Image (cartoon, rainbow, N blue to C red):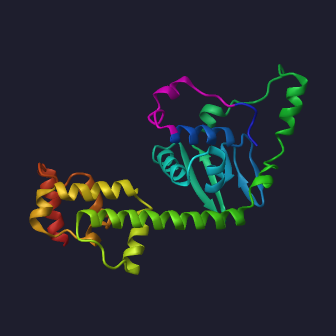
Amino acid sequence: MAEPYIKLYRKMLTWEWYDDINTKILFLHCLLRAEWKSGSWHGINYEAGQFITSLPNLVKETGLSLQQVRTALNHLKATGEVTDFRQGNARIITIVKWNEYQGDNRPTNRLSTDFQQTSNRLLTPCKEIEEYIEIEELEEVEEEGAADELKNDIQEIVDYWGENYTPIAILSPTRLTNLAALLQQVTVADVKKGIDKTKQSEFIQDKHFLTFDWLINPENLTKVLEGKYDKNYNKQSEQAIEDFWRGN
């Protein structure tokens, strides 16, 4: 259970995700949910600045969709605000700079007696987690939701490819596996942007080497997104193209 208050610094106004509503909502929620005292729950240890949760719980608590939560969480992890790891069936989120910005949060002697009594009750480690987290059940819900989301994401990519190139006739197990692995690293929007950039690349269009399987290789998609096959490629791009021909 978190302490009754957190510190919120004005410099957050210049934070790079401040204008991203979903990411801002999720980060503020994480700050409010983070424990301020170490403890243990069901054999899982947690430290100050951490809390135990699941994606379905974050969806329920923030009002965001599952995809919005995933995207916002990836934003926060990418820029180092939080880390997210699994221990058994539990998802543990850590506020990276908790001690730096929140570590001095302690009730003072100036607090009223009633407030101090409330604060003392909050020292009990994470008791009400049991009221809304049944980890095994939530994990099943999360996996089902993730499977549906992944299926929809793959279908969106396949459909978008078919709108621009010859439609995919067969989604083999290998292709499905490769797409699932790719979507662990990038978003559907990234893949669609990559498809758009291949159509704008004179080099790719002239050489006719592009295939769906080639594009969904993470290394190749990265090169496309970074502009290494753009029309006005520079010397660095030329080197990348030479490397491509050596490796293919």
Residue 241 picture quarter: bottom left
Q: Residue 80 appears at what percent x and percent y?
A: 49, 44
Q: Residue 183 appears at what percent x and percent y?
A: 42, 62
Q: Is residue 82 above or below residue 103?
A: below
Please indicate whether residue 199 sits to the left or right of residue 80 in the image.
left
Q: How many marks?
A: 0
Residue lying at the far left in this picture: please name it: 206
Rendered residue at 29%/57% (across/down)? 222
Which region of the structure is painted magenta?
A: 6-21
> Of 163 and 174, which appears nearest the observer?
163
Q: Is residue 114 above or below residue 42?
A: above
Q: Is residue 11 magenta?
A: yes
Rendered residue at 14%/57% (across/down)? 239
Q: Main secondary structure of the magenta part?
A: loop
Q: Is residue 189 visible?
A: yes
Placement of the N terminus among the 4 image quadrants: top right
Q: Residue 213 appears at what percent x and percent y?
A: 29, 72
Residue 169 picture quarter: bottom left
> Of 181 and 239, which appears nearest the observer?
181
Please indicate whether residue 125 sits to the left or right of residue 150 in the image.
right
> Of 38 and 193, which appears nearest the observer?
193
Rendered residue at 60%/34% (across/down)? 100
Q: Is residue 47 above or below residue 44?
A: above
Residue lying at the far front in this picture: please name it: 163
Q: Residue 174 appears at what percent x and percent y?
A: 38, 79
Q: Is residue 78 magenta?
A: no
Placement of the C terminus among the 4 image quadrants: bottom left
